[in-house]
Image: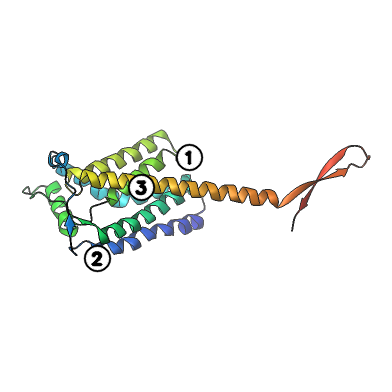
């Protein structure tokens, strides 16, 4: 892919931070706040080390999308479209169905504890269902398995990171298991829908191309048999 074409395609990734401008205004108490905590959530321990994949995802998601863009442009488009639509639908849910996840008090002074406190300080605990981290990570997980021309090591690394990000949401007490389920369902459904739309568009283009010309029988120069002549239809 040429540099100019690469930059033109890549600029569409700016839609993600632009859409995310809607996140902060929604992440405050506006009315009824619900809890989706289950008994299983209460038994999940807090593990501060998961702050690394959780924070790294903000950057690595764009790295993986850039990798898709270079290796499989159709996959890049379907993944990016799924993420953007997923963000908008998630924000719509946040606006009308607000949930809260209780957080532990962080006592340590090490790097991981400080990073977790930083996260808690900039992200209020209200925009939880569905989990955006899970939604985007699951889209990348599924898309990685369908990437063309990519080595198995790269696919494995991408999927492993996606799984770690999903796990980090519950071990950091950012989300509940219901939030995770909602993110997986939303991400998986949107990716399937976008892939189906691409296939339908591709079939439609093939039909239009087939109708654009016909093969007309014609005698050869010896008057024997028939040759075919392409006739372009206006």
Residue positioned most to the left: 107
What is the distance, in whole Å, between disc 2 and disc 1 at their CAs? 39 Å
In the visual, does 74 lie left or right of 87?
right
Across and down, in percent, residue 38 comes to 16, 43
In the visual, does 1 lie left or right of 158?
right
**Residue 162 tag number:** none
Instruction: Pick whichever of labels 1 and 3 is earlier in the sequence.
Output: 1
- Residue that appears at 40% across and 51% down: 82
- Color theme of the render: rainbow
Report whether residue 75 is seen. no
Instruction: Pick whichever of labels 2 and 3 is earlier in the sequence.
Output: 2
Viewer-closest of 161 and 230: 230
**Residue 187 tag number:** 3
- Residue that appears at 26% across and 45% down: 180
- Residue that appears at 32% across and 44% down: 184
**Residue 148 tag number:** 1
Residue positioned most to the right: 222
Across and down, in percent, residue 139 comes to 37, 45
What is the distance, in whole Å, between disc 1 and disc 3 at their CAs? 20 Å
Instruction: Pick whichever of labels 2 and 1 is earlier in the sequence.
Output: 2
- Location of the C terminus by quadrant is bottom right
- Residue that appears at 5% across and 49% down: 107
Across and down, in percent, residue 52 comes to 22, 46
User: Is label 2 in contact with label 1 (beta carbons under 8 Å)?
Assistant: no
Across and down, in percent, residue 167 comes to 23, 41
Residue carrying label 2: 25
User: Is label 1 in contact with label 3 (beta carbons under 8 Å)?
Assistant: no
| Secondary structure category for the residue under label 1 | loop
Q: Nearer the viewer, mark 2 or mark 1?
A: 2
| Secondary structure category for the residue under label 2 | helix
């Amino acid at each position: 892919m040429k540099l100019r074409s690469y930059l033109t395609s890549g600029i569409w990734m700016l839609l993600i931070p632009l859409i995310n401008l809607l996140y902060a205004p929604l992440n405050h108490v506006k009315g009824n706040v619900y809890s989706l905590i289950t008994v299983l959530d209460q038994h999940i321990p807090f593990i501060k080390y998961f702050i690394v994949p959780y924070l790294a995802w903000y950057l690595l998601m764009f790295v993986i999308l850039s990798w898709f863009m270079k290796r499989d442009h159709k996959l890049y488009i379907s993944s990016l479209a799924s993420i953007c639509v997923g963000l908008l639908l998630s924000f719509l849910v946040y606006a009308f169905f607000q949930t809260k996840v209780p957080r532990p008090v962080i006592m340590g002074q090490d790097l991981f504890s400080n990073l977790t406190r930083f996260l808690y300080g900039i992200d209020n605990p209200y925009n939880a269902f569905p989990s955006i981290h899970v939604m985007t990570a699951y889209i990348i997980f599924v898309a990685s398995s369908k990437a063309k021309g990519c080595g198995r090591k790269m696919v494995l690394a991408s999927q492993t990171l996606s799984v770690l990000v999903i796990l980090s949401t519950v071990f950091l007490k950012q989300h509940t298991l219901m939030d995770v389920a909602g993110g997986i369902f939303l991400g998986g459904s949107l990716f399937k829908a976008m892939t189906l739309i691409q296939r339908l568009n591709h079939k439609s283009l093939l039909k239009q191309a087939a109708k654009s010309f016909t093969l007309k029988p014609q005698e050869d120069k010896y008057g024997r048999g028939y040759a075919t002549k392409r006739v372009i239809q206006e």
